[in-house]
Image: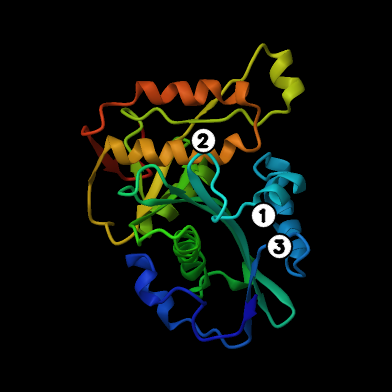
């Protein structure tokens, strides 16, 4: 599906992050947006190649086969009591690639009162299109996927939480610190890592994991935008557990169950459901 329109399909200026409201004046003339739902979509390969060129050498981009598997997920066919919808969004300006992002909406069907989790995988705005408001819309587009996933799973509307997995703040790593500051400026907050010890799965090949004696999960922080709740500074542990369980359901479709065991076991270390968890600035150290 593609379109050329004043505003991207499925979201409005009201969906922009508070600090991204200036993007509401962005002129979409000449831009087209494609929501790739298959690796055969004509815009998929240019988008994937751009993400691979940016993130592949850093070990931060999934192989083509993993993306193809994710595109086969259908909210109408839940997995482990979760409805999932992956999409890649490619924005073209005339014949030039302007921006691309991918993400997965995950609906926890066992807990209908919990928000939809949208896992933010990658975002790339090409240099010539930075600083003009396009990035703000790209940050908001995952909200569309959340709503579509809910609708196709025949669920009532729910709050939406956008989630990025980020390395700890460290001024010794200026690129990392700069990225955290960028998220912070547009209203994202960090789940207090001194209380929630989130672990990303071990992304190494199975042979490397076995040679090392087992999976070694990676400690990361959860950086979130709780849509329409950006001014709240506290979240209950129950909501964080639902988010993490949703992420592990996503990863569990691509990783061996034995390699996910340490991650799933870590949930037992989280505080009781009603425990208030602080939401702190992403750039906060420690």
Instruction: Name above or below for residue 275 compared with residue 233.
Output: above
Structural distance between the alpha carbons of marks 2 and 1: 17 Å
The residue at 51%/71% (across/down) is: 131
Q: Which mark is residue 43?
A: none
Q: Is residue 169 visible?
A: no
Give SS at disc 1.
Answer: helix
Q: Which residue lies under the disc numbered 2?
A: 248
Give SS at disc 3.
Answer: helix
Q: Is residue 172 left or right of residue 203?
A: left
Structural distance between the alpha carbons of marks 3 and 1: 14 Å
Quarter of the picture holding the C terminus: top left
Q: Which mark is residue 47?
A: 3
Earlier in the chain: of badge 3 and badge 1, it is 3
In the rendering, at what x and y percent does residue 43 appear?
Answer: 73, 69
Instruction: Name above or below for residue 23 compared with residue 192.
Output: below
Quarter of the picture holding the N terminus: bottom right
Circle 3 packing at 10 Å, graded few (<14), some (14-19), many (20+), is many
Q: Nearer the viewer, mark 3 or mark 2?
A: 2
Q: Is residue 114 left or right of residue 2?
A: left
Circle 1 packing at 10 Å, graded few (<14), some (14-19), many (20+), is some
Circle 2 packing at 10 Å, graded few (<14), some (14-19), many (20+), is some
Structural distance between the alpha carbons of marks 3 and 2: 25 Å
Say which quarter of the image contains residue 18: bottom left
The residue at 67%/11% (across/down) is: 213
Give SS at disc 2.
Answer: helix
- The one nearer the camera, 151 or 30, is 151
- The one nearer the camera, 147 or 98, is 147
In the rendering, at what x and y percent does residue 25 appear?
Answer: 43, 83
Q: Which residue lies under the disc numbered 1?
A: 71
In the rendering, at what x and y percent does residue 215 appear?
Answer: 61, 20
Q: Nearer the viewer, mark 3 or mark 1?
A: 1
The residue at 54%/47% (across/down) is: 78
């Amino acid at each position: 599906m593609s379109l050329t329109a004043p505003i991207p399909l499925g979201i409005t200026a009201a969906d922009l992050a508070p600090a991204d409201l200036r993007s509401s004046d962005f002129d979409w003339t000449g831009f087209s947006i494609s929501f790739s739902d298959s690796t055969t979509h004509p815009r998929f390969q240019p988008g994937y190649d751009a993400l691979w060129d940016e993130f592949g050498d850093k070990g931060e981009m999934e192989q083509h086969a993993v993306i193809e598997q994710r595109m086969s997920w259908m909210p109408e066919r839940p997995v482990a009591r979760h409805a999932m919808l992956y999409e890649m969004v490619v924005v073209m300006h005339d014949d030039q690639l302007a921006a691309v992002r991918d993400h997965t909406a995950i609906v926890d069907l066992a807990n209908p009162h919990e928000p939809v989790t949208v896992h933010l995988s990658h975002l790339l705005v090409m240099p010539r299109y930075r600083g003009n408001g396009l990035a703000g819309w790209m940050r908001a587009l995952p909200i569309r996927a959340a709503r579509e996933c809910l609708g196709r799973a025949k669920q009532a509307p729910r709050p939406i939480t956008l989630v990025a997995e980020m390395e700890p703040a460290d001024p010794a790593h200026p690129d990392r610190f700069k990225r955290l500051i960028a998220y912070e400026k547009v209203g994202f907050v960090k789940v207090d890592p001194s209380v929630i010890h989130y672990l990303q799965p071990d992304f190494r090949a199975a042979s490397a994991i076995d040679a090392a004696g087992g999976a070694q999960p990676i400690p990361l922080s959860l950086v979130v935008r709780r849509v329409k709740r950006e001014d709240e500074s506290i979240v209950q542990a129950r909501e964080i557990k639902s988010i993490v369980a949703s992420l592990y359901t996503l990863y569990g479709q691509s990783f061996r169950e034995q390699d996910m065991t340490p991650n799933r076991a870590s949930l037992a270390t989280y505080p009781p459901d009603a425990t208030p968890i602080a939401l702190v600035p992403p750039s906060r150290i420690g």
